[in-house]
Structures are given as structure tokens and as C-alpha cells.
Amino acid sequence: MEEAEKKQKIKIAALQMNSVIGDIQKNCEKIKAIIQSELTSDTDILILPEVWSCGWHCPVFPQCAEEIDGSTSIKLLKNIAKEYNVNILGGSIILKQKNNCYNACPVIDRSGNLVATYEKNHLFSYYGSDEGKYVQAGNNPVMVTLDGINIGLTICFDIRFPEIYRAYRKAGADLLVNMAAWGSNKPIPWEVMTRSRAVENQTFMVALTQCGPIANGEFNIGHSRIIDYNGNVISEIKDQKEGIMYAELDLREMYDFREKCTILNDIKEKYEVKSLCVK
């Protein structure tokens, strides 16, 4: 579909929360309470953060792993989608498939159908975390189309790899989403890279993270933002607050901007580095 044919607006909602470590039922109850209190009826897409069902504490991943059939978390999202007539990017849950577990985002349409999953491509095993010990990495980026909007999905540590975002943009992404549980000890990378991915790809960006305490004295950064194609923050949640942030994205303005500033046309097929030794 040509960009000129897709021009429209869409209302998105992103839910920031502090998950209870290792307790799927309590986190489902928390999600329901926040949505009942704050979700508006005209929302087109609802987005949740990474590992909302169990919290960012890798040792609890095995006990919180769910299969698609019978998943408490996915059942909740399906019910919410149908009740509120909203598409859902389900942050991530620990999804068990055959003998492997994945940090995976379930995507639910307005009718409550599971239409896709995205398995986190890059696993975080630094600063005392060892995600790669408990889950497998996904193999491919996944772009989903909801209400005619092409959305590139990423989870947390994926943000450090601009190549995946450029691949989404080249594939026709209108919106880039990073669903995270980002640590408070890394504020500069979070602030800089989330905005950079929007600017360098001329694309709206949702940078959604958890808030509040994690475990062992660690905290989530709790600064979720929705960023436009010029790097402007158009909605945000600060101060470790749980709740929902909203933005209506005017895709017509983004398409017009892309037509006036065609920077992606300047990308070379190959960048061959010449190493020069000057004495």
C-alpha cells in the first residue's frame, strides 16, 4: 500500500506498571485494575511493558513460563481486547514452546484473536542479569498490521541494535515500539536511544518501560515516552507512577515529512571502510 493511501490518525495507549515478582495472578489483577480505571473507550491500540506478568527477575522465568494454550496472561489479554474493542501489543510474557522458553510479545486483535508473537531477538546478560540462561533468542523481527498501521515490535535490549529498526522502516513501518523493563542505573542509554530510533527512521516511537522496585535493591527507570518522527516527546509518564499515557498519532503529518525529507534515499547499499594508517 502506498503511503499516500494510508494517511490517517490512530490513538494509542501505553500502560506503565510495577510488576509483582513471580506472581502472574497478582499482575493480571493489577493490569485489570489500571485498565478499568484509566483506559478510554476510543483507544485503538493498547501496549503493555516487558515481562509484566512476572517482573524482571530472570530466576523466576521458568516458574512463570506459560504455554499458549491455557495461558492465564494471554486469556486475560483476549478478554480485555474483546471487552474494550482494542488491539493489544501484550508487552511480553515468558512463553513456553516445546522445550524452549522465550521472552515473547503476544499480539491480540480487537476480536480477541492471537494474531502474532514476537520473540525477543537480543537477550540481556550483563550487569548481573543472565537472561540468556533462562530463555532462547528469537530469530526474526516481526512487523504486525493493526487497523492498517504497520508496527515494528522490539523488546528492551533490542533498542541497542539500530539495524532491527532500520529493517522495520525499510519494510514499511509506521510505528516502532520498544516494550521494556529498563533498569534505573542506565538512564542515558534509555533517553538517547529511544529518541534516536524515532529520528533516524522518521517514525513514531513508543518507549514503554516498567516502574518501581525489581529485586535485590534494583529499580525500573519508570520513564515511558511516546516520541514523534522528529524526536519530540508527545506524551510521557515520570516519577515511577503507574498508569496509562495516551497519544493520537497523525500519520498524515509523518508521511508528508518523509516526502519532504527523503533521507532514506541517501543510504548506500554498502559502506566499505577504508582503514588508513597515518604516521
Image: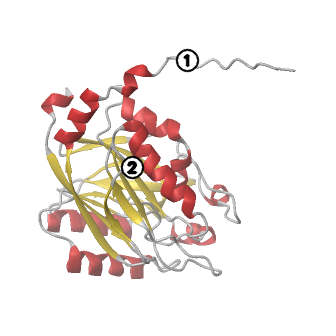
Q: Residue at x 65, y 80 (%)?
A: 216
Q: Which mark is residue 252?
A: none
Label whose residue precedes the other's in the sequence (1 or 2): 2
- Percent x, y of residue 51: 47, 65
Q: Residue at x 44, y 39 (%)?
A: 165
Is 141 on the left or on the right of 9, as rendered? right
Label 1 sits on residue: 270
Quadrant of image for the N terminus: top left
Q: Is residue 215 above or below residue 172?
A: below
Please identify the quarter of the rendering in which residue 74 is found.
Answer: bottom left
Is 216 on the left or on the right of 180, as rendered? right
- Percent x, y of residue 229: 32, 44
- Percent x, y of residue 160: 56, 47
Label 2 sits on residue: 117
**Pointer 2 local density, CA inside 10 Å: few below 14, some 14–19, many at least 20:** some
**Pointer 1 local density, CA inside 10 Å: few below 14, some 14–19, many at least 20:** few
Q: Secondary structure at mark 1?
A: loop
Q: Residue at x 19, y 60 (%)?
A: 86
Label 1 and label 2: CA atoms lie apart by: 32 Å
